[in-house]
Image: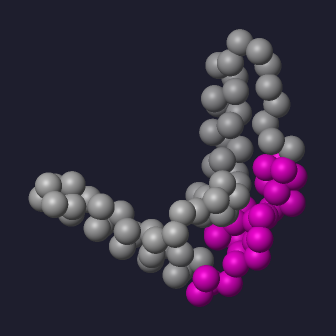
Amino acid sequence: MAAMGVLENVDMIGADLALAIQKGVLSYLADKHEPSALLVKLVDEGKLGFKTGEGYQKWTFEQADARNRALREYLIGVTKERSTGK
């Protein structure tokens, strides 16, 4: 499976979840940082990624489903390799 970029990953997990994670992590840093303006904009516009069909990019159901299937198959393969030591 080809590596996913940061924004494709955001579309996969959901911009809302990515923003919540950023807010949580950033709140623990000594110097105050703001969440990504792009994530805030996407969430405000309801562009949450795979779940809405649009995030950083537009996704058809088929495209999102194919990416999810490929990721599942990859993770299952890695898990099997690690459990058998091969």
Question: Residue 79, how many percent across, how many down?
Answer: 26, 59
Dominant SS type (magenta) = loop
Is 20 placed above or below 55 here? above
Q: Which residue lies most toward the bottom here?
A: 62
**What residue is at 46 percent from the left and 71 percent from the top?**
1
User: Vertically, is 32 above or below 58?
Assistant: above
Q: Quadrant of residue 52?
A: bottom right
- Residue 31 found in image quarter: top right
Drawn side of residue 40 relative to residue 61, left or right: right
Give residue 54's position: percent from left, percent from top: 76, 71
Is the image coloured rainbow, by chain, by secondary structure, or in one colour?
A: one colour
Quadrant for residue 24, please give it. Answer: top right
The magenta stretch spans residue 47: yes
Question: Which is nearer the eye, 72 or 21?
Answer: 72
Residue 12 horizontal/vertical position (percent): 60, 63
Q: Position of residue 11 (x, y in %)?
A: 67, 63
Residue 21 vs residue 31, the one in the foreground = 31
Q: Which residues are magenta?
A: 38-63
